Structures are given as C-alpha cells and as structure tokens.
Image (spheres, rainbow, N blue to C red):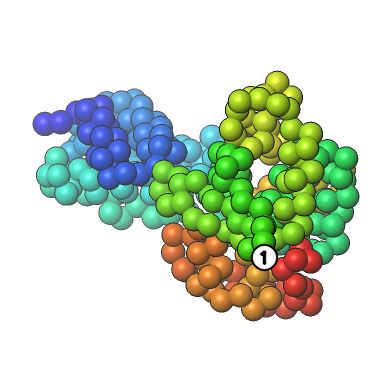
C-alpha cells in the first residue's frame, strides 16, 4: 500500500508531466502537504484509510483557522484532484473526495475603471515616466503584469511608414506568445520612458535605477501607490487589464478578437465580461481615447 507522503510525490510528478504551470504545481503541492499533515495527526498514513468525513473535518479545521471560503474552495479542488489521480492510477478503489462539497462564496466581479479614474491615475503618475509607461502599456494592451515584467525592448515595435506599432507578448508557462497592437498613447509613453531609461546591456524593457529587471511585486507596489494618490479605491493592477477588455467590448470589438488580444485560453473567460458591462459603463469610447 502506498503512503500519503509517497502518493503526494507521485501526484506532483504527474502534474509536472502534464505541463501544468509552476504556480499551479506549487499551490497543489502545498495544499496536499497540508492535508497530509492533518491526516498524520489522525493517524492515517495511507490514502485508502481516508474517509469523506476525514476530509470534511480538514475543511472545517481550515474554516476555524480563518481561511476564506475562496481559499477552502481551492484546497477542496486540490484534494479532489489528488484523490482522482489516486483512483485513476488504482492506488485506491474508492474516492473519498467524490462527495466533498465546495463552500459557497460570491465571486466579486472584475473592477472596471471609469474614464475619470484612469485619467486620474495617469495624472498621478505623470512625473514618473517609468511607471507612467507601465500604466499606459497595461491599460492600452491589456497584457498581464507578469508578461509586462518579461517584455524586452525588442518586443516593442513602434509605428513606421504607415505601419502600426505592435507588442510581441512573450509566452508563459501555460499560454503561447501573441502580438498586440500598440496605439499612439502607449507608444508615446514608452518613448518618453526610453529617453530616461538607464544605459545598460539589460534587454528587459522596464528596469530599476541600477539596471536590474523590475520585479512584479515592485510594479504592483508602485501602481498601488499611484492608485492611492489618485484617490481610486478598491482597485488593483489587474483592473487595468479588466478595463482594457471591457472597453474594447463596449467599443464593438469582436469577442473572438478581444479574447485573442487578451490571451484568454477560453472564449468563455471573455464572455463573462458581457453581462458585467451591460449598463455598467459610460458611453463607449474610441480605443485611442483610453
């Protein structure tokens, strides 16, 4: 009989072989490690000894410890995936997680910035050419903050001889690379930043004063600071991406094209915005007015 600890290792190996992202593998790994520690306290070292009641007790313990319903739901999903893997590979004959239910919680809809809000954000960062360029690029292209942090100077092509500019978005662990149009507002902001960018051999577009790549957490911290300076409440960096998607749909850009530009893996992800934007936004604006 396989031990929970060994089953955990095989589970991680299987996730990795499937090409799951490192973030997903890490999250699942920690969740099952936490479950394993709980089962050890119960004196159950083998998966076949685990009952649905044991798993429910684990989730109840998480609730008492202050985990949010959303976090518990993710751990429930990890647990279900783990035991499904064990069942498929015949390490167990019965799946105790089959009847395990997700806690109910309400998903907050994406935050979409109004015209007044994103103009205020721009104004607050006007004198910081690096962050101003980052904000404009996120708002005008809808790229993910992780994608932006990996952008190289060569990935940005400015307009030339009547040909529009574009950004080559590097591939991630779970999605391919893509090309996104670069409008005049973003192009202008990037050019201003490049004029003051430190001279260095580093090819990453956005760097620190010492020439090192700007980390995602540094970008988040800086933009959060400007959200506060602009008086914009309850907003996060990813809301610039939400705003890009919503305003494109409001402007009549096709669902398929918006999905492609945003790099959504499923069209259903883009479709979720349709109900959200009904009656929520102002009069549709032209894309270059963003």
Residue 89 locus on image (x, y percent): 14, 44
- Name the quadrant of the N terminus: top left
Report whether 15 appears left or right of 103: left
Viewer-closest of 76 and 137: 137
Say which residue appears at 14% left-offset and 40% top-offset: 91
**Residue extending furthest toward the top:** 210
Residue 218 in the image: state x and y as whole percent: 68, 32
Of residue 261 and residue 36, the one placed in the foreground of this image is 261
Question: Image quarter for residue 224?
Answer: top right
Q: Reply above or below: 73 against 264.
A: above
Left or right: 87 in relation to 285: left
Q: Judge by depth and name the residue closer to the eye, 61 or 114.
A: 114
What residue is shown with label 1? Answer: 162
Q: Position of residue 240 (x, y in %)?
A: 69, 54
Q: Nearer the viewer, residue 125 or 187?
A: 187
Q: Could you tell me if residue 197 is visible in this image?
A: yes
Residue 69 in view here: no
Q: Is residue 269 above or below residue 54?
A: below
Q: Which quadrant: the C terminus?
A: bottom right
| Rendered residue at 75%/66% (across/down) | 288
């Amino acid at each position: 009989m396989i031990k929970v600890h060994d089953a955990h290792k095989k589970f991680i190996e299987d996730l990795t072989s499937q090409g799951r992202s490192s973030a997903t593998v890490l999250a699942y790994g920690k969740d099952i490690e936490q479950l394993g520690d709980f089962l050890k306290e119960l004196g159950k070292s083998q998966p076949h000894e685990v009952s649905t009641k044991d798993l429910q007790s684990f989730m109840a313990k998480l609730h008492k410890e202050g985990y949010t319903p959303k976090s518990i739901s993710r751990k429930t999903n990890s647990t279900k995936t783990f035991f499904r893997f064990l069942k498929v590979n015949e390490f167990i004959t019965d799946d105790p997680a089959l009847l395990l239910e997700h806690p109910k919680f309400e998903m907050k809809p994406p935050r979409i910035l109004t015209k007044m809000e994103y103009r205020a954000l721009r104004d607050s960062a006007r004198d910081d050419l690096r962050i101003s360029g980052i904000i404009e690029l996120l708002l005008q292209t809808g790229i993910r903050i992780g994608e932006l942090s990996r952008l190289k100077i060569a990935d940005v092509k400015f307009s030339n001889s009547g040909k529009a500019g574009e950004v080559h978005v590097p591939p991630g662990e779970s999605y391919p690379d893509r090309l996104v149009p670069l409008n005049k507002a973003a192009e202008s902001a990037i050019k201003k930043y490049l004029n003051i960018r430190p001279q260095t051999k580093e090819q990453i577009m956005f760097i620190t004063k010492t020439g090192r790549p700007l980390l995602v957490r540094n970008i988040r911290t800086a933009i959060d600071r400007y959200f506060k300076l602009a008086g914009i409440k309850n907003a996060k960096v990813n809301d610039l991406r939400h705003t890009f998607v919503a305003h494109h749909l409001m402007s009549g850009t096709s669902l398929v094209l918006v999905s492609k530009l945003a790099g959504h893996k499923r069209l259903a992800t883009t479709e979720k915005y349709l109900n959200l934007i009904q009656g929520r936004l102002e009069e549709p604006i032209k894309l270059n007015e963003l």
